Amino acid sequence: MSVIMKGSEVAASMKEELLREIEKLGQHGIVPGLGIVRVGTRPDDLAYERGAVKKLEGMGIRCRVFDFPETISQQDFEKEFSAVNDNPEIHGILLFRPLPKHLDEETVKKIINPLKDVDCMSAANIAKVFSGDETGFAPCTPEAVMEVLAHYGIDLQGKRVTVMGRSMVVGKPLSMLLLKKNATVTICHTKTKNLVETCSNAEIMIAAVGKAKVVTHYLVAENAVVIDVGINVDDEGKLCGDVDYDSVAPKASYITPVPGGVGTVTSSVLARHVVRAAGYLKKIY
Amino acid sequence: MSVIMKGSEVAASMKEELLREIEKLGQHGIVPGLGIVRVGTRPDDLAYERGAVKKLEGMGIRCRVFDFPETISQQDFEKEFSAVNDNPEIHGILLFRPLPKHLDEETVKKIINPLKDVDCMSAANIAKVFSGDETGFAPCTPEAVMEVLAHYGIDLQGKRVTVMGRSMVVGKPLSMLLLKKNATVTICHTKTKNLVETCSNAEIMIAAVGKAKVVTHYLVAENAVVIDVGINVDDEGKLCGDVDYDSVAPKASYITPVPGGVGTVTSSVLARHVVRAAGYLKKIY
């Protein structure tokens, strides 16, 4: 039987440490502040926003949502974003992406203060993640994966880890975080040939492809640790991951469920980044 | 019998294209200029400098060496480096690294104009390589590897490629360039366990570990393409690569020699970057 890696357990243990940090900031008169910047009203964004605001406010992190109509002009958006960026009460900024097509994300990436860039948009933070410099902010989701692995005591040193997916929000940065922990990392993607041969010797398999249930038991080795980053909707309209849970779970030694796995930890990582950012900016750390 | 992939052939074919580009710049009254910044007199640096200056000057690229004593202070070095950076006749800058320990490389990485950063020191260029944005400059050596593979018509799409080594000058950026070409990339390193099992199914094996002859035939699959990025000195004082050439060559379908392989192509990539930088800066491209 496989061990189910529950996001709620990871989040609970992170929360304890976070509350201590937030208390410490409080002793310096600082209330850590997150600015959430949203253009439009995509249901996914709204759902994440609600969850994150509830969790972070519950810990004592002040959240402020800056929402703009989908029709906002580039010039206005830059002005508004710069104001959030310059707001001394906002220590961390989360921008929902992708932006509507008429808005240029690249400009925003150049505007954001790397010290407030808690979800890794700026070149400065991207370069730090790539080079293994831990003073920057990695994107929240890949860091959540690392938290889950660490919480369940999964040793990465020298292990064969396969990452399925090569996006800039999960696959690539996650590969770098795994390398930093001395894993041997294989990055697979839609163009990978002989997927079974390539995947089935992985000791740890991480699915971040964004397609419902594509990782079946054929792709997973006996006793592998399986982490599912996907959040999809299946044919019956139910939330599911990239992993075909029912066929894979019996083979896995550890597995994350969807929902209730990595996704649950992402906003805890966001909280930690905001707290760290507040400490940096106020020069407490 | 394996095909020997000769750096000189790759460089010769690159030269033709470069000469055309340099002529085009000349029609706009531009002589592309490289500034080589060297602190101290490390023999390796001097050897590379001599070779690069000879090759680039031979094509019509103006090279200027800015050399400083190893004792230069941080403040003076920053001033001197900034002057090179601001020099309008210098379109590309090559800084020999590592710098002496008392000098802070991070500051220099922030000073350099990303448009002149032809060997990928700045966060802007590192982030571009990581995200697969080809408007930046990748480091010269990994790009030389890509040139060798392309010149010999090695298809990368979906292929299993193993990169041995995870440095910021070769292994990591090379992995990103390979991913961009849709290879399935595995990154191995000193902490990799079961190296034979992990490496021996690679269709393409790239050695960038910096240790003489450590890649033996046990690690290489029959008919693999083998690229050797290493430049080492063996027990007899002879130049050699990371690959144990004599044992590996009979198994390989293609192989690069050392010397005469990837190293020969690196300065051609440098030349191309300087030419591109001159075009960018003068807004010809």
Image (cartoon, coloured by chain):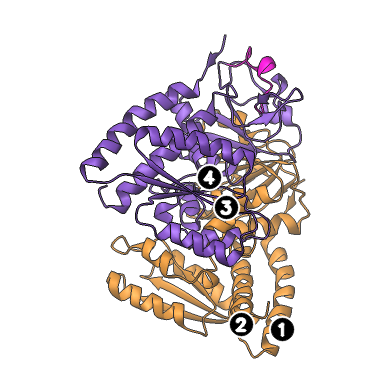
Chain colours: A orange, B purple
Q: Chain of mark 4?
A: A
Q: What residue is shown with label 1?
A: A24
| Foreground disc of the pair 3, 1 | 3
Q: Secondary structure at mark 4?
A: loop
Estimate how packed mark 3 is, as few (under 14), some (14 to 19) or many (20 or more) residues with alpha carbons within 10 Å: many
Q: Earlier in the sequence, mark 4 or mark 3?
A: 3
Q: Are marks 4 and 1 in contact (CB under 8 Å)?
A: no
Q: Residue furthest left?
A: B27
Q: Quadrant of residue B250?
A: top right
How far apart marks 4 and 3 lie (CA) works out to 16 Å
The chain letter for the residue carrying disc 1 is: A
Q: Secondary structure at mark 1?
A: helix
Q: Are the residues under marks 2 and 3 on the same chain?
A: yes
The reply to whether the magenta stretch includes residue B243 is yes
Residue positioned 39% across, 67% down in the render: A108
Q: Earlier in the sequence, mark 4 or mark 1?
A: 1
Nearest the viewer among B156 and B105 is B105
When asked about the image quadrant of residue B56, the answer is top left
Residue designated by label 4: A165
Q: Which residue range is magenta in the image?
A: B241-252
Disc 1 versus disc 2: distance between alpha carbons?
12 Å
